[in-house]
Amino acid sequence: MKSTSNCVRNIIVSAWLRGEAVDTIMEWTGVSRATVYSIYKQFRDTETIEPKKQPGRPPRLSESDYDSIRELILKECDITLEEIIERLNLPIKKSRLSVITIEMGFSFKKRVSVQKSSNERMS
């Protein structure tokens, strides 16, 4: 689930502190009643509007790894996924790298040019 932007959080808290009605705040920001109450409660308890850290496993690749993958593919357009993993010493599997490269807009499908057979089809 996507977190509410800091701009919207700021609007919610400032409107609440001005005494605006919750229904009005909901209309202005397009968020639910529960979100308005939740964000104000967080502000009241912690005095911050920053979203809470989302739980989950940290990503295995850093931004520099993504940049390295992109540069390597642009430099060597015929490189295979296995070669990328080996050269950059990436801690991921081939299937995950395939998803990453597709998200980057690259395709590894190779077109095979087949010559037309000189033999006529026999009946």
Image (tube, rainbow, N blue to C red):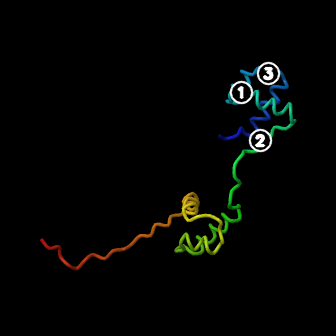
57 and 53: which is toward the camera: 57
Determine which residue is flagged by label 2: 52
Relative vertical location of residue 119 with respect to residue 107 in this rendering, above or below: below
Q: Residue at x 74, y 28 (%)?
A: 36
**N-terminal of the two: label 1 or label 3?**
3
Relative vertical location of residue 102 with respect to residue 51 in this rendering, above or below: below
Place of residue 58 in the rendered image (x, y in percent of width and height, measured from the top left): 71, 54
Secondary structure beneath dot 3 equals loop
Nearest-to-viewer mark from 1 and 3: 1
Nearest-to-viewer mark from 3 and 2: 2
Q: Which mark is residue 34?
A: 1
Identify residue type, mark 1: Ala
Secondary structure beneath dot 1 equals helix
**CA gap, disc 3 and disc 2:** 25 Å
**N-terminal of the two: label 3 or label 2?**
3
Q: Residue at x 80, y 27 (%)?
A: 15
Q: Residue at x 39, y 72 (%)?
A: 112
79 and 92: which is toward the camera: 92
> Pointer 1 and pointer 3: residues touching (CB < 8 Å)?
no
Secondary structure beneath dot 2 equals loop
> Pointer 2 and pointer 1: residues touching (CB < 8 Å)?
no
Identify residue type, mark 3: Glu
Which quarter of the picture shows residue 123? bottom left
Place of residue 23 in the rendered image (x, y in percent of width and height, measured from the top left): 71, 21
> Pointer 3 and pointer 2: residues touching (CB < 8 Å)?
no
Crowdedness near tag 1: few (<14), some (14–19) or many (≥20) residues, C-alpha within 10 Å: few
